[in-house]
Image (cartoon, coloured by chain):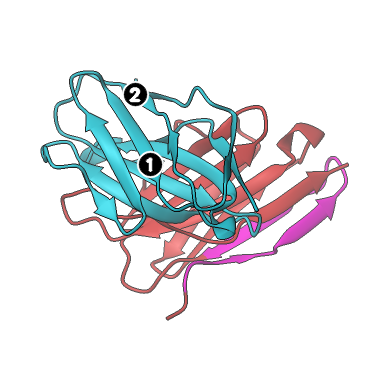
Amino acid sequence: DAGVIQSPRHEVTEMGQEVTLRCKPISGHNSLFWYRQTMMRGLELLIYFNNNVPIDDSGMPEDRFSAKMPNASFSTLKIQPSEPRDSAVYFCASSLVSGGGGELFFGEGSRLTVL
Amino acid sequence: AQTVTQSQPEMSVQEAETVTLSCTYDTSENNYYLFWYKQPPSRQMILVIRQEAYKQQNATENRFSVNFQKAAKSFSLKISDSQLGDTAMYFCAFMIPGGSNYKLTFGKGTLLTVNP
């Protein structure tokens, strides 16, 4: 079975450029999460969707970040314009929420470097 | 807000020995879930073990077990018979089920090195 699929695995870009990270959750899962991992701050939740609807975006750092989930099988995280401090590994995770603590399945992450 | 604290940034253990990773958390909730995730050098986060707060019995998964002390808000992970493949970052995580609180809050992690 395919797990959570993220692309690209690595992205190097210059400050000011637009970056789009993509995620395909596990089929049948109804919740999707975007996390950011840095050495300084660890793993931070950026945004959480349930049934394609954003439920909690309080972790989105600022207006330069936006996330969409147009359907149950695809989500994007966009940074525009990108800055060097956005350099991090971005993880997408999906889960089947059924009233309890469902396991989150993570993708392999997208490592972003902004020069 | 919920917080998760892992007080050991790094630990090491000899192959075949036992090691315990510490985790404490802070919450006013009574119903919640606790997890240990492993992140090997490949970077992918993998669930190791999970504990429901309403269960008194400590969770066990093969060589991995937890010591859940609800009153003390402590959730330590014990790895028995350590193997080289256990070398990884280990993250303790906390979740409150339901509504907008359904999200994992992670600790900063413990880097475990298993030495041959």
- The chain letter corresponding to cyan is B
| Residue kind at label 2, given as amino acid type | Tyr
Which chain contains the residue that carries disc 1? Answer: B
- The chain letter corresponding to red is A
Q: How far across and down, in percent of the image, does residue A61 sit? A: 58, 30
Residue B71 in the image: above or below residue A28: above
**SS type, badge 2:** strand
Task: Residue at 29%, 48% (x, y): give it.
Answer: B50
Q: How far across and down, in percent of the image, does residue A54 sit? A: 38, 46
Task: Residue at 38%, 67% (x, y): give it.
Answer: A72
Task: Residue at 35%, 33% (x, y): give it.
Answer: B76
Task: Give the quadrant of the C terminus of chain A.
Answer: top right
Q: Nearer the viewer, residue A60 or B96?
A: B96
Residue designated by label 2: B25
Residue designated by label 1: B78
Residue A77 in the image: above or below residue B97: below
Q: Which residues are magenta?
A: A3-23
| Residue kind at label 1, given as amino acid type | Lys
Of badges 2 and 1, the one in the foreground is 1
Q: Is residue A18 magenta?
A: yes
